[in-house]
Amino acid sequence: MATTAEVLVTGGKTYNDINEDVARPLESFPTKKWWICFSVALVFLCVGLASWTKEFTTGIGVWGLNHPGGWGTDITNFVFWVGIGHAGTLISAILFLFRQKWRTGINRSAEAMTIFAVICALLVVLTHTGRPWYAAFWLLPYPNQRQLWVNFRSPLLWDVFAVSTYFTISLIFWFVGLVPDLASIRDRATNKIRKTIYTILSLGWRGSNKNWLHYETAYMLFAGLSTPLVLSVHSVVSFDFAVSQLPGWHTTIFPPYFVAGAIFSGFAMVVTLLVIMREMFGFKNYITLDHLEKMNKVILGTGMIVGYAYACEFFIAWYSGSPFERGAFLNRMFGPYWWSYWIMVSCNVLSPQIFWFRSMRRNIGVMFVISLYVNIGMYFERFVIIVTSLHRDFLPSSWDMYVPTFWEWGIFVGTLGVFFTLFLLFVRFLPAIAMGEVKSVMPSPKEGGHHS
Amino acid sequence: MQNQTPKENTEGLPRHWMTMDELSPQYWTDKSAQEKRGQEFFEKPIESLEALEKTGQAGIARRDFLTLMGASMALTATACARRPVNKIIPYVVKPEEITPGISYSYASTFTDGFNSYGILTTNREGRPIKLEGNPDHPVNKGALSVRAQASVLSLYDPDRLKHPVKLDRSGSDTGLKVEYKDADAAVMAALKSAGSVRVLSTPILGETTRKLVKEFLGSFRDGELVEYEPVSLEDVAEAQALSFGGGHPTIPGYSFEDADVVVSLGADFLETWGSSTENARNWAKRRKPGERMSKLISFESMMSITGANSDERYPVAPGDEYLVALAIAHEVVGHTSFAGNSQITNKLSDYTAEKVASIIGGVVTAASIKKTAQALLNAKGKSIVVGGGLSSKTKDALSLQIVITFLNCALGNEGPTVDGNLWRYKAGPQHSEISKLIGEMNAGKVQALIIHGANPVYSLPDSLAFAAALKKVPFVVSVSDRVDETSRFSNFVFAANHYLENWGDAWTNNNVVSLQQPAMAPLFDTRSFEDSLLAWSCKKTSFYDFLRENWKNTYFKSKGNGQNFEAYWEATLQKGVVVVQDKAKPAPRSFRAAAFDRVGKPSVSGSGMRLALYESVGLGDGTMANNAWLQELPDPITSVTWDNYIAMGPEAAKKLGVELNDVVELTLASGFKFELPVFVQPGLHVNTVAVAVGYGRTHVGRVGNGMGVNVFGATELSSGMRVASGFSVTARKTGRRYELAATQRHFQHEGRPLINDVTLAEFKKNAGAAMHTNPHLKMENIDSLSMWTKHDYSGPYRWGMAVDLNSCTGCGACVIACQAENNTPVVGRDRVRESREMHWIRIDRYYSGSPENPDVLFEPMMCQHCENAPCETVCPVIATVHDKEGLNEMVYNRCVGTRYCANNCPYKVRRFNFFDYWKNYSETMNMVYNPDVTVRTRGVMEKCSFCVQRIVKAKDHAKDKGTTVRDGDLMTACQQTCPTDAIVFGNINDANSRVSKISKDARSFRVLEILNNKPSIAYLTKVRNKESEGAPAHGHHS
């Protein structure tokens, strides 16, 4: 199948090896490593639950928000998680359409990451409101006796549509991709309950030609549907800021800048996760150094786009002549939150530059550290945009500092808990590598016929 | 029932029946049976009832029983209802009934120290919820100060004493609840055996109360009234007496509306000195830019409201006001009729402008003193010199006042602008009275002491040891609204009424007396001081009758014009105020040069730091320290809430090596020391440290206890007068830090085009000068750039506002008025530190010029009700919407609290309920809520609504009359209370409305016009009556 010299699966794996390797974590009792990770994730989740409980029972005053600063880590978390999600969709949809075969080893987990990240994003955006018990449904346009409607001019409403659409499409896309593999797991299942569950989930997949034909058509369609979302979702998220009047937010560069940033942070998160996952489950032959190197290239490229955007913002602020714009950007660099700005620049612009060197791109330790840096840097990018713009806006009389409290960090930790708990459950119960797709990019077995 | 007939049965019998009788045809036809059926219950044996009635042995028949029971229940209920027993008359409408949803106004009187203001209470469902100035009252004419506005909250203070208590005199503030009967008996027994009785009271402004007290004391062998007020004008009164001789020492009336030049030497006459609400109102009349604009020059140690509003302000060290007075007098005297009076000139000869300027240093130069003197000379007979606030009450206070009195006489102001025939206040108590009392107490000469309201343990100098003296009095009884620092040493504390529960009157000036009628029956088991006195004198009359009787014999007799007393009384109650004597023509008094014998050499000097005490705008002398509105009112200059602090200039702070929030210990020569955090206040002399009194209460209640530090103890009595400032202090940095809760934490203006000020000269050249100082302020032809279709304002109304920065003194009365009107929560010190204060209107303060002596600008900031409101577009649930009358409305019920609107508001006027702040109005406090305004729950955004409830009410009234709302029918709460008429609200669809006209003034500008939000509030550029040289630097650079 593979026409190029590229070797996407190493270790001389056979089709059967793939089934064995990928299904192993599902069919054996979890390893000690998994339990350790899972316990940590659960602890994080509990911290989050406690923080949310505190918030719901007392009010969001337990956070550090105040009058110039209506948003802080809450929306930072939201944008961070939505951004993380983007890599999954990019890998599974756009790379699919561009016939980038190297994606097969990583797309499943990247998509899972997307879904879990969007779940986190939805959680934080709902709970950031003052009255989430109403926000949960008042933000949706539904017919009601009071004839109350939503405001279609509000970027927050666009967010509701963008993110919920994104979640739905991603979930379906992911699930459709899972069906053939679920059938494989079903076929291997010996336990009756297990068999029943996987039978239901695999939707009666028999692996017939017709099945594959429909599957591939559907997959292609979903890939096509998801592709614009990669661009649109984060553009819409950026409108939350770009459409407002606030100096530092009111910027036309935001949509492309946010999309690039999203892909940047998403790839970094994929690298972080895959480095762990391939170690933990022995997927080194499926998620090879080549895969990781390609992702590091994407990180380098998008990191430079982000760096360009930073520079461009400053130029425009100066060029505008507006004292408010200039003030906002000078305040970012040299104001009281200077440290967050410089963390952002060093993590996002400087640190990926090391990937110009091939040896560094292929060094697991280096890429793991850089991917963490990028995650931190992108978190701070959102923090910088939100907090430094808000805390000093137009009238100096209102200016004040915003300091996140324990409960806010608790919620961030909680979203990490949600994310990792779901991810660990995912690798435990679902095939973390798309077996069917990996097989398609392997050389045909000597004795086997042409497959798909 | 009586004429029931069976309808549904053809045989004439009912289809449905209840008793067998009904089945007999006679039952329905027999007359007597028909009658009996008139009784309500059929099953009652008719025969036995009949028999009983006939014999007359029935006792009480059932119906009679029910009738009587109903009546007695009704009577019982009436008797228990908390309704004023005495007849009170509403301002406009007669109180036939309390109609739910309809408010009534009652005219009454608020007294604050020496000042009394006419108020109108707004009563809803029988309780006052808001106070407004009485427009008929000649002194405040509708305006009210912050404390007057806030006093309604004190009515519902849950920490008020709710019943009389018996204490053990150990100083413990928890006592045994006692009944009035028992307590009265104990008091009367004690008084019977006491030969010498003293009544120690806060200033008694009411002549009727004074008469009652005198009568009461007259029944003792040795009875005396001692009045006590910690911050008094005794220096002015004494100087008046010395300068003009004879008569009762009085304080003259000042006509700021007639003054071209006002020079203040430490007197904050716009806020804390004298009849400040009246002063501010009159002064502002002459602050419209133009030929008649007056000039205000001040020399002061701390930064006061008056200083902040001065055209020229010169910081001096505490006490140096006196040097300035001498130097001005020195410059002036040669040009006046006193030029040849050596008694005076000899005293002044030493104080040349050069010499004085070199002593004072800082920004004060000989030229500035000469300029001031020249300005006064140019306005002979049309100027006023005032001085002597707490911050300039040094040992030289009397000398300073004599020089000031001399200046006013020499300049010919005596008569035209300073009216000795119109006493605004009687001199009131002097500290000599209370020091005499302490002497008597210590000598065991006082057998019984009755304390009314006064709190000398808190506010007297520590050196006088009032508490120790109090212990030597065998019997002490207090009439107080709480067991405070002083009354906790009493045998009994009688719970006093709040003034809104009290009858009384108040002497406003020698021409005007205003009546005080209760707006509600006492909330708790309290009794007024006057009724207590009557009870203890075994009189059966109530104070209400006493008051009526006294009025009948005095004011009615002299000015009743022969009408019937009832009619006079009702009319007076309705109006709330009565002119008891026609205003006499001002007659200049002649200055007695002999007064200069008392003018001493300046005793306060030296290059070290000196302490100035002052009254804060909110708390004043601290009496109302348990009022959360006042505690949370940001100081207009520093914006600090809930605490006092040491204010020092940037240079002094640098010298000491401290910055904002560094805790510093100040030690006086007397040994008194205290620690407070530093607030670096631009515009203070390097030798000045200023601290507010009124804080540090220990027994005032849950709100005020332990807020700040009490510095009254630092004061001294010197020749019978309170010395509050000028003490040499040594400062020590403690190394600790304490975060002051300031609402405005950023002190730079950042050179942004946010506010405009120009000098009068610039204004005269071009009235719209400020508009063009920055290209970012003015937008031309921006209408075509809008992407939205414009709103349709074609209805009769579009609401708008104009704020004249020239009139606004920054006093903060609007902030409290808004809080009272709109149920705005109080959040507490910690929440203010977190920048979560909830005020719908705030006063932004900006400085321009050098930090040594900056100009101060105030910009009241509230929701701008923008035409292109940035908040409206971003709300996802349409919780904030634009209405057809230009209001930006907030739908609390719909708000889910995304806070996006607040983020997108460039004015940052939206306030978010981070918690259930409404819970802070605990216990009885929530009775102050305005029922017309929703109380907001947590998670909801709120902001200024332009008092939409008042708009709706005005429109309803107009509709009832078949008209539309006319200009002036409707005032927002902030506008209503503003003493200087700086805020004008109205219909901008009406080209003839005041607001429309003002908005079109050449000075008009909109804040952040560049954003094209099109605010509905126009601001008018501040014009300073000063030469261009000191033109502010900001606004010209960006």
Image: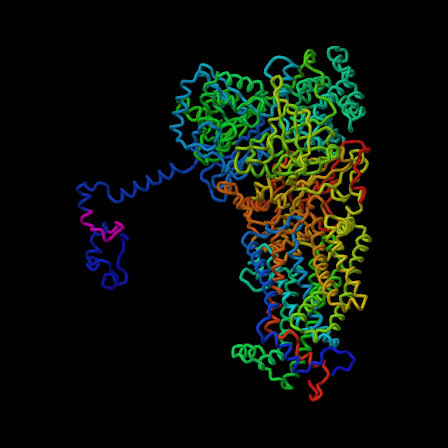
In reply to whether residue A167 is colored magenta, the answer given is no
- Work out whether residue A343 can be spotted: yes
Which corner quadrant of the image does residue B303 belong to? top right
The quadrant of the image that shows the N terminus of chain A is bottom right
Query: Where residue B701 appears, x then y in whole percent?
Result: 52, 36
Query: Where residue A164 appears, x then y in whole percent?
Result: 63, 66
Residue at the spot 67% in from the left edge and 80% down from the top edge:
A216
Q: Predominant secondary structure in magenta? A: loop
For the residue pair B388 and B137, the one nearer the viewer reads as: B388
Number of marks in picture: 0
- Work out whether residue B992 can be spotted: no
For the residue pair B910 and B104, the one nearer the viewer reads as: B910
Query: Where residue B331 appears, x then y in whole percent?
Result: 78, 19
B303 relative to B798, above or below: above
Q: Is residue B203 left or right of residue B216?
A: right
B888 relative to B361, above or below: below
Query: Where residue B650 appears, x then y in whole percent?
Result: 74, 35
For the residue pair A276 and B774, the one nearer the viewer reads as: A276
Which region shows up in magenta?
B37-49
Query: By what rule are the colours in the image chosen?
Result: rainbow
B660 relative to A413, above or below: above
In reply to whether residue B47 is colored magenta, the answer given is yes
